[in-house]
Amino acid sequence: MSERCILITGGARSGKSRFAYELAAKVGKPVLFVATAEAGDEEMKCRIEEHKRERPKDWSTIEVTTHIGSQIKREIGRAQVVIVDCITLLINNIFNKYSHQTDEQIDASILEKEVESEIDGLMECIDHSSASFIIVTNEIGLGLVPANKISRLYRDLLGRANQMLAERANGVYFMVAGLPVRVKSAKLS
């Protein structure tokens, strides 16, 4: 894996995106921002617009719902820093493809394969790129066990995706109340 991959995890509204922006600004090279959110309702549209306003105007942005690795390869251009924000919503996008199914109809093995394929594709993209990558994700497994099968499966597969990324990343930060706690050391170059 590239020596330039940082994973930032933490709870919702813990400062993950802001910290990713700060790290990218320190590198000071052309930035490609990869947004994975889908605006499914008015509140989410407002959140997406808020995030857009926070980003520097000279950053390139692509919106990607799945197949993130191949789309980054196509769009990376001259970017030397790629921010992926965020894996949590990327995994949610995979689950949304099966939203018409009930808990009993969901085939966990199919979802697991799709999640692993998505993360493998992203890691392959990183491996074949000279850019630095900053990947944002949520840590959702710290609370209560979810009450239904699909929510438990989502928690488990996001946890698996996070582990796959953390294993390969050179640096991992856990955000707590806006403060980055270094879990695995590395510097972006």
Image (cartoon, grey):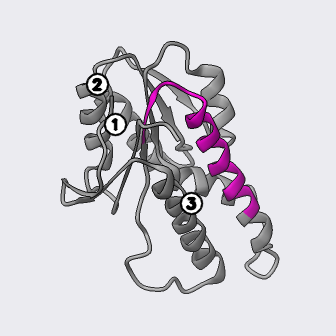
| 126 is within the stretch colored magenta | yes
Q: Secondary structure at mark 2?
A: helix
Q: In the picture provided, is 22 more to the left or to the right than 57?
A: left
The quarter holding residue 20 reads top left
In the image, residue 10 lies at what x, y percent? 33, 60
| 148 is within the stretch colored magenta | no
In the image, residue 36 lies at what x, y percent? 54, 42
Camera-near label (2 vs 1) is: 2
Labelled disc at residue 161: 3
The answer to which of marks 2 and 1 sits earlier in the sequence is 2
| Residue drawn 43% across the image and 37% down it | 3
- Identify residue type, mark 1: Glu
The magenta span reads 113-134
Camera-near label (3 vs 1) is: 3
Q: Is residue 48 above or below residue 108?
A: above
In the image, residue 122 lies at what x, y percent? 61, 42
- Identify residue type, mark 3: Ala
Q: In the picture provided, is 32 more to the left or to the right than 147?
A: left
- Identify residue type, mark 2: Val
The answer to which of marks 3 and 1 sits earlier in the sequence is 1
**Marks 2 and 3, how far apart at CA:** 26 Å
Badge 1 is on which residue? 50
Marks 2 & 1, CB-CB < 8 Å contact: no
Labelled disc at residue 32: none
Label 1 neighbourhood size at 10 Å, few (<14), some (14-19), many (20+)? few
In the image, residue 9 lies at what x, y percent? 37, 57
Labelled disc at residue 27: 2
Q: Taken as a whole, is the magenta stretch helix, strand or loop?
A: helix
Closer-to-camera residue (156/100): 156
The quarter holding residue 114 reads bottom right
